[in-house]
């Protein structure tokens, strides 16, 4: 039994997952308490090594009241891919939100996004640049997702696209162990 404990103790993958589970959720109360489920989302892109299928980015979408994570892998971080990801992962699954928050990247702040949001009655709010608390929920989920992807890849982001669904599920179901 001691050898099993030692292997688990020395395993970097196990340590990464254990560390990710220690993080307490941000979504209890606060400025999101006025929204009902699905009405407010924070979104962002993370960059990962390019896959054989040409995917390099993941659109991450976090529901503000519960912290539920949705992900959508794409080859390029563009306005069109942002809209496709939001439609497939948010609107068609959770309903049309009232509010979406993002940074001011060109894939979010442009006429295509503005027109789409207006047509759907969505208020699009841009975070204060370089002010982490404004985007805290999505940034924290990005870190958790990357930790899970790295752990599932055996310490690297190898085959991250194959592990994305499981990593997303792990972020959504692990909760807080504290």
Image: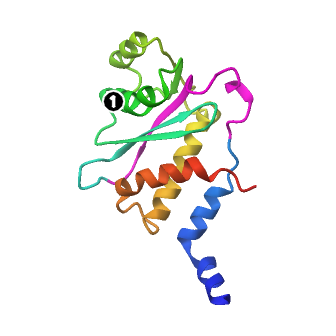
Q: Which residues are magenta?
A: 26-49
Q: Is residue 8 above or below residue 44?
A: below
Q: Is residue 104 above or below residue 132?
A: above
Q: Is 84 placed left or right of 170 in the picture? A: left
Q: Quadrant of the N terminus?
A: bottom right
Q: Quadrant of the C terminus?
A: bottom right
Q: Is residue 61 above or below residue 153?
A: above
Q: Is 31 placed left or right of 132 in the picture? A: right
Which residue was labeled with disc 1? Answer: 84
* The magenta stretch spans residue 178: no
Q: Is residue 49 above or below residue 126?
A: below
Residue 145 vs residue 63, the one in the foreground: 63
Count of labels shown?
1
Callout 1: SS = helix
Q: Residue at x 71, y 56 (%)?
A: 177
Residue 177 vs residue 51, the one in the foreground: 177
Horizontal and vertical percent for residue 66? 63, 35
- Image quarter for residue 65? top right
Q: Residue at x 41, y 28 (%)?
A: 92
């Amino acid at each position: 039994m001691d050898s099993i404990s030692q292997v688990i103790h020395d395993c970097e993958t196990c340590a990464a997952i254990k560390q990710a589970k220690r993080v307490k959720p941000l979504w209890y109360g606060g400025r999101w308490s006025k929204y009902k489920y699905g009405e407010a989302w924070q979104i962002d892109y993370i960059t990962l090594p390019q896959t054989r299928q040409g995917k390099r980015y993941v659109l991450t979408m976090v529901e503000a009241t519960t912290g539920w994570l949705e992900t959508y892998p794409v080859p390029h971080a563009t306005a069109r891919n942002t809209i496709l990801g939001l439609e497939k992962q948010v609107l068609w699954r959770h309903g049309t939100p009232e509010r979406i928050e993002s940074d001011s990247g060109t894939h979010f702040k442009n006429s295509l996004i503005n027109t789409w949001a207006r047509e759907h009655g969505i208020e699009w709010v841009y975070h204060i640049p370089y002010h982490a608390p404004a985007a805290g929920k999505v940034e924290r989920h990005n870190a958790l997702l990357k930790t899970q992807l790295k752990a599932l890849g055996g310490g690297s982001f190898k085959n991250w696209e194959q592990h994305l669904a499981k990593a997303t599920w792990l972020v959504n179901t692990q909760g807080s162990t504290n």
